[in-house]
Image (cartoon, grey):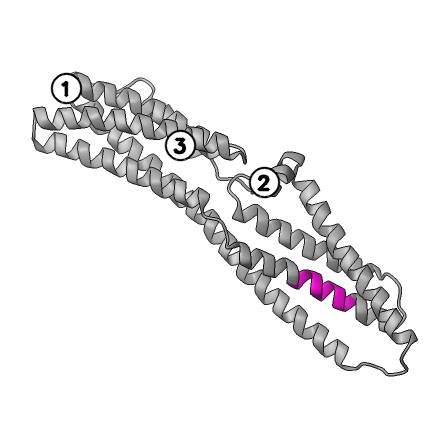
Amino acid sequence: MMVLEGLAAQGLGVFALLIFVILLLSYGMGMFIGRWHQARSEETIEATSFVTNGLLGLLAFTLGLTIAMAQGRFEARRATSLAETNAIGTAWLRASSLDHPRAAEIARLLEGYTRLRLEFVEAPLKQAEVDRLSAEAGRIQGVIWGHVTAITRERADPLSAALQASVNDVFDQGAAQRWAFAAPIPGELLAFLMGMAVLTIGTIGYQFGLKRMGVQPLAVMLVAVWTGAMVLVADLASARFGAVRPDTALYQWTLQGFQGGVVIPRLP
C-alpha cells in the first residue's frame, strides 16, 4: 500500500513508465542471454518458439482473468454508490414526513452524512484520510440512530418502524460501499501477472537473441501494449488510484434533492 501511495502521488504516468522500463529491461536481458548462448553453441533451439507461444497464451489468459476481476470491482463500487444514495434519499423523505423535532434533526444529519460520503468517494489514496472519514461517518450514524431509537420508544407505530428500517438500510449500504472500496484484487494474482509478463517478455528477447536480432520495433510495441494493459488493471482495481474513478454525480444529485426541504402544497 505504501508503494502504491507513493506512485499515486507521482501520477499514473510514473506508474506506467516504471512498468514499461521493467518489461523493457526484461526483454534486453533475455536478448543478451540468447546471444550469449548462441555464441557458445551451434545448436538451434527450435523449442524456444513453442515455449514462447505457450507463455504468451498463458499471459493473455491471466491478463483477461485479472481485467475481469478488476472490472467487477469497479462495477461493485458503482452499484454500492447507487444503492447507498437511494437508501439515503428514502430515509430523508421518511424523516421529513414525520412531524417530530427529532425527525427533522435526522433529516438534517442525513444531509451532512451525504456530504461526508461524497468526500469518502472522492478521497485520495491516503489511508489516514479514509480512516478519518469512516470514523466521522460512524459517529454521525450513532447520533442518527440515537434519535431514531428515541422516536421509536416514544411512538411505536408503522411510521417510526419504516423510518427505523430506512436508516438501518442506510448504514448497511454504507458498510457495503466501504467494503467495495477496500476490497482489492488478490496481491498474489497481481504478482503472478507481473512475473508472467517479465518472464514472457524476457523469453521473447531470448528468442530474438538466438537469431542475433537487435531491438525490434515490434517488440518495443508489444512491451508498450502490455504496459498499457497492466496499468489498466491497476486503474480499474483501485478505487483511489489512476484516472478511472467512481462517478460522484449520484451524491450530488441527492444533495440537490435536499434543497428546499419538503413542501406541502395547499389543498385545491
Q: Residues within 10 Å of mark 1 (few under 14, many from 20)?
A: few
**Residue behind mark 1:** 99
**Residue behind mark 3:** 134
Nearest the camera: 263 or 245? 245
Number of callouts: 3
Residue 38 sits above or below residue 96 on the image: below
Q: State which quadrant residue 166 falls in.
A: top left
Q: Residue at x 64, y 70 (%)?
A: 57
Give, as a three-letter code, the residue at label 1. Answer: Asp
**Residue 66 can be seen, yes or no:** yes
Task: Report the magenta residues as a range.
Answer: 196-204
Q: Residue 122, how many percent across, how many down? A: 49, 32
Q: Residues within 10 Å of mark 2 (few under 14, many from 20)?
A: few
Q: Residue 251, how many percent across, how many down? A: 40, 31
Secondary structure state at the residue bearing disc 2: helix
Q: Residue at x 84, y 62 (%)?
A: 216
Give, as a three-letter code, the residue at label 3. Answer: Ser
Closer to the observer: label 2 or label 3? Answer: 2
Q: Quote the CA–CA distance across marks 2 and 1.
A: 50 Å
Q: Residue at x 62, y 65 (%)?
A: 60
Q: State which quadrant residue 120 falls in.
A: top left
Q: Quote the CA–CA distance across marks 1 and 3.
A: 31 Å
Q: State which quadrant residue 140 falls in.
A: top left
Closer to the observer: label 1 or label 3? Answer: 3
User: Left or right: 99 with respect to 196?
Assistant: left
Main SS, magenta region, reads helix
Closer to the observer: label 2 or label 1? Answer: 2
Secondary structure state at the residue bearing disc 3: helix
